[in-house]
Image (cartoon, grey):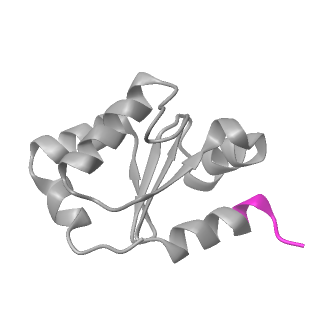
Amino acid sequence: MSTIEDRIRQQVKENDVVLYMKGTPQFPQCGFSGKSVQLLKACGAQFKSIDVLADQEIREGVKRFSNWPTIPQLYIRGEFIGGCDIITELYEKGELQKLVAGVKV
């Protein structure tokens, strides 16, 4: 039987860009998740979103997995990038665009 960490590891391994967020890209349930989606879309990024509100086990597990206390959380090519503040900073520096260039979902 797999653990929640195994599930999360598999999700970030199978998808180049994964955003753990509150809600969905079409209906974000918090401002930080909504802003993160907007920035990824502004980069033209294809990404997999996981609604942590739909799965309490994922919501708590992803915080332990990354050792990061807040949602949203962004992973690119298996690497934990950070939350909304870091996503915003990378976007403003033009680095997020480079990170998501050529990724697959």
- Quarter of the image containing the C terminus? bottom left
**29 sits to left or right of 4:** left
Image coordinates of residue 41 in percent, x first then y, are 26, 48
Name the residue at 55% across, 53% down: 66
Name the residue at 47% across, 39% down: 72
Image coordinates of residue 70 in percent, x first then y, are 53, 34
Image coordinates of residue 39 in percent, x first then y, are 25, 42
Write the start and end of the magenta stretch as one range: 1-5
**Residue 95 falls within the magenta-colored stretch:** no
Whether residue 86 is visible, yes or no, is no
Q: Residue 86: name its quadrant.
A: top left
| Residue 67 vertical placement versus 26 (above, below) | below
**Residue 4 falls within the magenta-colored stretch:** yes
**57 sits to left or right of 46:** right
Taking depth in this image into account, of 41 and 79 the one nearest to the observer is 41
Image coordinates of residue 4 in percent, x first then y, are 76, 59
Q: Residue furthest top?
A: 31
Whether residue 100 is visible, yes or no, is yes
Name the residue at 53% across, 42% down: 68
Q: Main secondary structure of the magenta part?
A: loop
